Image (spheres, grey):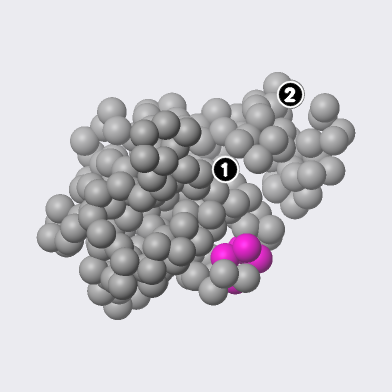
Amino acid sequence: METNTKNEAGGLLDWQVAEHLLDVQAVRFAPDEPFTLASGLLAPVYCDNRLLLSSPAARRTVRDGFVRIWKEEGLDAEVITGTATAGIPHAAWLADVLERPMAYARAQAKAHGRGCRIEGGNVAGRTTIVVEDAISTGGSSCAVVETLRDAGAEVQAVLAIYSHGFAAARQKFEKIRVPLHVLTGLDVLLEAARERETLSGAAAQAILAWRADPEAWSVRHT
């Protein structure tokens, strides 16, 4: 299940995060010159959450948003695990606030050294949450969950800054029985961009058509 969260003042936290993403120019809309996602699919929108690192205010909003999810969902994981590489800094800031050990995990083992997939804190026999920067098809995040389970950890939830909201991603998380909580998503980003008059209505509709059937959209734009 994918959920968003609200802040204590009643305003939408997902709107705040979307505004930060637009402020640091982390979001690029290009319906006519699509990007290639890690999954190989073409996409008319790209969200580079690494640019949030440049903004102290954005970092605090993300950290506090994750803390709010932690409290609202009653999470009590013993270890905070970030995904390599973009989830690592946000996992570190969250672990610091929560005073928990931290680890980070890769979807695939390193090709050198000891070939470790999990670094940092020991997760064997312990509960953990996964901190991710963005969810597209969900494949890499679910692979990290399986990596942690193989190491003997119990994964309580995945927390992500952003999700495109693909139905296929939701189905993947349902299949592995791990809840997904996101701070913001594509619908909010499009609405915020439209309000700023940086995205046309036609472009927004094209992007929503892509989300409805990304595979077919990619074929048409290849």
Residue 97 percent across, percent down from the top left: 15, 56
Mark-to-mark CA distance, 2 and 1: 16 Å
Looking at the image, residue 153 sits to the left or right of residue 209; the answer is left
The residue mark sitting in front, 2 or 1, is 2
Residue 109 percent across, percent down from the top left: 47, 43
Amino acid type at mark 2: Asp
Query: Which disc number belongs to residue 86?
Result: none
Q: Which residue position is annotated with label 2? A: 32
Q: Which residue position is annotated with label 1? A: 190
Looking at the image, residue 18 sits to the left or right of residue 30; the answer is left
Q: Residue furthest bottom?
A: 74
Q: Count the marks: how many?
A: 2
Residue range of the region highlighted in magenta in the rendering = 170-174
Is residue 155 a member of the stretch shown in magenta?
no
| Front-lying residue, 4 or 152 | 152
Q: Residue furthest right?
A: 220
Question: Which image quarter holds the N terminus?
Answer: bottom right
Amino acid type at mark 1: Leu
